[in-house]
């Protein structure tokens, strides 16, 4: 069988990015996915909103749900302080294998830990396994029907502190209606919607930023 789309992206990044230059890795993925074939990276327009939220939050500990090829992992990782840590959960081992190489090429492997498995299994283990106290930023970009149950799990696991920022991708397309309904009506969060475009297309999409109030 032909190599997978993530492996085609990796081959293009190896050819066109500068090792150790995270920006050139993100740019190479965007060039490939704009010019050759679409892929479900957060992309350029939503990526700029992600950059702004990460910079404003300046987190020590970040959790990402949904690594895919590691594009958003690289975008987030390049903005973190050297001592900050980024844990990213990917359920597909083949995607994780590609992401690990892309993150290493970006020179970010010292800040990033990829966990392979389901969020529902791994979130309850985070405190114990990774001696994490609480999370400063959670980027949610995995199965859209898991956004809400996993947010509940983060709350119950004591992983959120007053001020923790949740940033959810795709709240319009493909959409995460149960999550949006819960988070916008909950008195425990202050939410804000950032309208944008679906990656590499002219379709509307957006990010929901929610601050946990404790
Ligand atoms: O589906 C999407 N992402 C999710 C991937 C699987 O995630 C599975 N997954 C990854 C960790 C993880 C941990 N636990 C359980 C499942 C877990 C996704 C889809 C689209 C999209 C938009 C329009 C279309 F016509 C078609 C697709 C765009 C996006 O930006 C997305 O993020
Ligand atoms: Mg997404």
Image (spheres, rainbow, N blue to C red):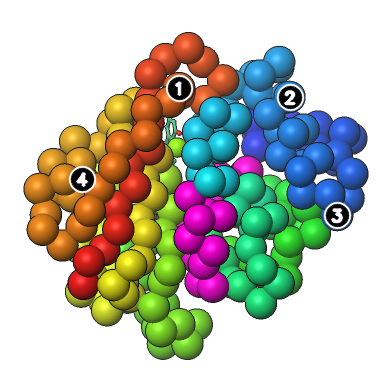
**Mark 2: C-beta under 8 Å from nearest atom of ligand 1:** no
Label 3 SS: loop
Look at 89% across and 44% down and name the residue there. Answer: 18
Residue carrying label 3: 20
Query: Which residue is at the far top?
Result: 202
The answer to whether mark 2 and mark 1 are in CB contact below 8 A is: no
The answer to whether mark 3 and mark 2 are in CB contact below 8 A is: no
Can I make out residue 153 in this image? no
For residue 31, the mark is 2
Residue carrying label 1: 197
Look at 68% across and 29% down and name the residue there. Answer: 30
C-alpha gap between disc 3 and disc 4: 37 Å
Can I make out residue 25 in this image? yes
**Mark 4: C-beta under 8 Å from nearest atom of ligand 2:** no
Within-10-Å neighbours for mark 4: few <14, some 14–19, many 20+ = many
Look at 71% across and 15% down and name the residue there. Answer: 35
The answer to whether mark 4 and mark 1 are in CB contact below 8 A is: no
Residue carrying label 4: 179
Per the rendered image, the range of residues in magenta is: 53-72
Within-10-Å neighbours for mark 2: few <14, some 14–19, many 20+ = some
Give the mark nearer the N terminus: 3 vs 2: 3
**Residue 31: percent from left, percent from top:** 73, 24
């Amino acid at each position: 069988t032909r190599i997978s789309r993530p492996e085609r992206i990796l081959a293009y990044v190896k050819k066109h990015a500068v090792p150790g230059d995270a920006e050139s890795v993100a740019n190479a993925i965007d060039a490939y996915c704009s010019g050759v074939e679409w892929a479900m990276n957060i992309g350029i327009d939503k990526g700029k909103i992600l950059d702004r939220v990460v910079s404003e939050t300046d987190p020590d500990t970040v959790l990402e749900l949904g690594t895919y090829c590691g594009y958003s992992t690289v975008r987030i990782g390049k903005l973190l302080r050297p001592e900050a840590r980024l844990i990213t959960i990917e359920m597909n081992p083949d995607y994780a294998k590609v992401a690990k190489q892309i993150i290493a090429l970006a020179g970010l492997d010292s800040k990033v830990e990829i966990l392979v498995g389901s969020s529902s299994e791994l979130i309850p283990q985070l405190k114990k396994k990774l001696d994490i106290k609480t999370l400063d930023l959670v980027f949610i970009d995995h199965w859209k029907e898991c956004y809400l149950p996993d947010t509940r799990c983060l709350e119950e696991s004591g992983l959120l502190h007053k001020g923790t920022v949740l940033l959810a991708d795709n709240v319009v397309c493909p959409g995460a209606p149960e999550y949006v309904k819960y988070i916008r009506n909950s008195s425990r969060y202050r939410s804000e919607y950032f309208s944008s475009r679906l990656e590499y297309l002219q379709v509307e999409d957006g990010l929901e930023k929610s601050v946990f109030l404790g």
